Image (cartoon, rainbow, N blue to C red):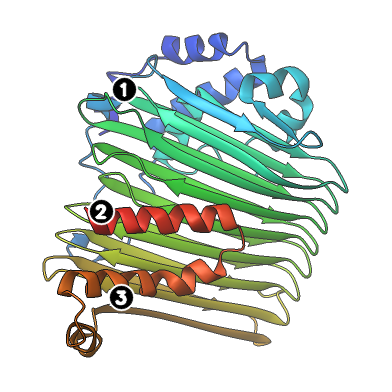
């Protein structure tokens, strides 16, 4: 696999990407280190059982659809005046020391093969800086991918006692042919007593393979809340993670996916409790139709110093077809007895009694099924505090049901 891609990737290309963004030497060196590390790195972890990988990343033909120097997009980045919302190039020009301090501080660039690939090749992205004490909403980032491959990077730095709400959306252009690859890394650094709400809505076309890793560090009394919706792509490998590093830190991870045709979703929610009085709530709901497949992994890791911890996890998948398939692996790793924690995962089909009740009262079978699916997502939608994101996700679910 590595040899395939390396035949299509050179140091000269990485240097050209860096030069086009007028990057400082330290960032070029970071890219080159990531490039050099590719030979030694494995793919991201996937759930394995004897004789089977639940998601196979090794068969992806990266050489066929990663074009390092052809990155085209339409990007819209807006936010209120009191928050700095910058492109990567702007951030390096205006806030280089901030970027140098925080870049790669949450996600190790050489954590796995795909993070290293993204670090070596990223050509677009957004830096959001929220100064101390600032409360802000309505930071919006829209990315439309117009090339065979696109590597995107997002950095959010929230100062002490600040708050911000960020919505990021990914789509693909309409006149694209052939298989494509989209990669997105998101790092969030939430300082003491800050709150970050970050929503991501992925709706790329079904010829696109996507990999995303979103991870945040929450300091003392810091809060990081994630909302992730996945409806697009042929294969999605996504992980949303929070490390609760300070006393009293909190995190909520809300996920929703809706697959049809032969889509494959491998989604994970992970939280590490590393300090006292920390709280986490992980909620995921997904629907599968046709021959779609999902793999879910939820991890709650309570460290030895995480006294008085509260950690909860719930995942539910609804299957609309006998040909669809769902697997779930919820995990509790408890290293401190002063913990209240729970986890659950369920897989099931549409309740036939509910369906019979509705059809016996004049509702058509298809309309009844659609109403039950929309109702299935309600517990997740109710958890989403950001109205714009809730409405967008609700509309996309309704559109999928009409197809």
Mark 1, secondary structure of its residue: helix
The residue at 54%/34% (across/down) is: 153
Residue bearing the label numbered 1:
6
Instruction: Say above or below: 260 vs 333.
Output: above
Name, please, the residue furthest toward the front.
362
The numbered disc on residue 372 is 3
Horizontal and vertical percent position of residue 294 = 28, 62
Residue bearing the label numbered 2:
264
Name, please, the residue furthest toward the left.
323
Instruction: Say above or below: 227 vs 43.
Output: below
Cα gap from disc 2 to disc 3, whole angstroms: 23 Å
**Between disc 2 and disc 1, whose residue precedes?**
1
Is the residue marked by circle 2 packed among few (<14), some (14-19), or many (20+) residues within 10 Å?
many
The residue at 33%/71% (across/down) is: 328
Horizontal and vertical percent position of residue 227 = 53, 57
Mark toward the viewer: 2 or 3 = 3
């Amino acid at each position: 696999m590595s040899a395939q891609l390396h035949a299509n990737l050179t140091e000269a290309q990485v240097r050209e990407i860096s030069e086009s963004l007028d990057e400082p030497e330290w960032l070029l060196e970071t890219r080159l280190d990531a490039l050099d590390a590719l030979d030694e790195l494995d793919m991201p972890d996937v759930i394995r059982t004897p004789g089977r990988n639940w998601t196979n990343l090794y068969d992806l033909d990266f050489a066929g659809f990663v074009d390092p120097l052809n990155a085209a997009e339409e990007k819209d980045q807006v936010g209120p005046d009191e928050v700095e919302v910058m492109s990567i190039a702007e951030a390096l020009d205006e806030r280089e020391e901030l970027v140098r301090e925080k870049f790669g501080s949450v996600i190790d660039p050489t954590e796995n093969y795909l993070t290293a690939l993204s670090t070596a090749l990223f050509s677009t992205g957004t830096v959001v800086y929220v100064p101390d004490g600032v409360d802000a909403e309505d930071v919006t980032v829209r990315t439309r991918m117009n090339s065979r491959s696109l590597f995107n990077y997002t950095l959010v730095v929230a100062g002490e006692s600040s708050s911000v709400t960020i919505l990021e959306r990914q789509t693909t252009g309409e006149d694209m042919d052939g298989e494509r690859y989209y990669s997105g890394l998101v790092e969030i650094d939430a300082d003491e007593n800050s709150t970050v709400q970050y929503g991501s809505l992925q709706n790329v076309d079904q010829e696109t393979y996507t990999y995303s890793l979103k991870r945040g560090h929450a300091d003392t009394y810091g809060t990081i809340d994630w909302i992730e919706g996945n409806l697009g792509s042929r294969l999605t490998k996504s992980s949303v993670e929070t490390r609760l590093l300070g006393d009293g830190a909190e995190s909520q991870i809300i996920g929703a996916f809706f697959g049809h045709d032969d889509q494959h979703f491998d989604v994970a929610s992970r939280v590490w409790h590393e300090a006292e009085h920390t709280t986490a709530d992980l909620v995921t709901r997904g629907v599968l139709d046709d021959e779609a497949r999902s793999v879910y992994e939820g991890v709650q890791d309570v460290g030895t110093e995480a006294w008085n911890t509260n950690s909860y996890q719930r995942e539910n998948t609804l299957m609309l077809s006998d040909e669809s398939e769902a697997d779930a692996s919820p995990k509790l790793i408890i290293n401190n007895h002063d913990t209240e924690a729970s986890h659950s995962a369920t897989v099931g089909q549409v309740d036939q009694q509910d369906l019979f009740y509705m059809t016996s009262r004049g509702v058509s079978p298809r309309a009844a099924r659609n109403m039950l699916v929309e109702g299935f997502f309600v517990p997740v939608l109710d958890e989403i505090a950001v109205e714009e994101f809730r409405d967008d996700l609700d509309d996309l679910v309704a559109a999928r049901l009409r197809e």
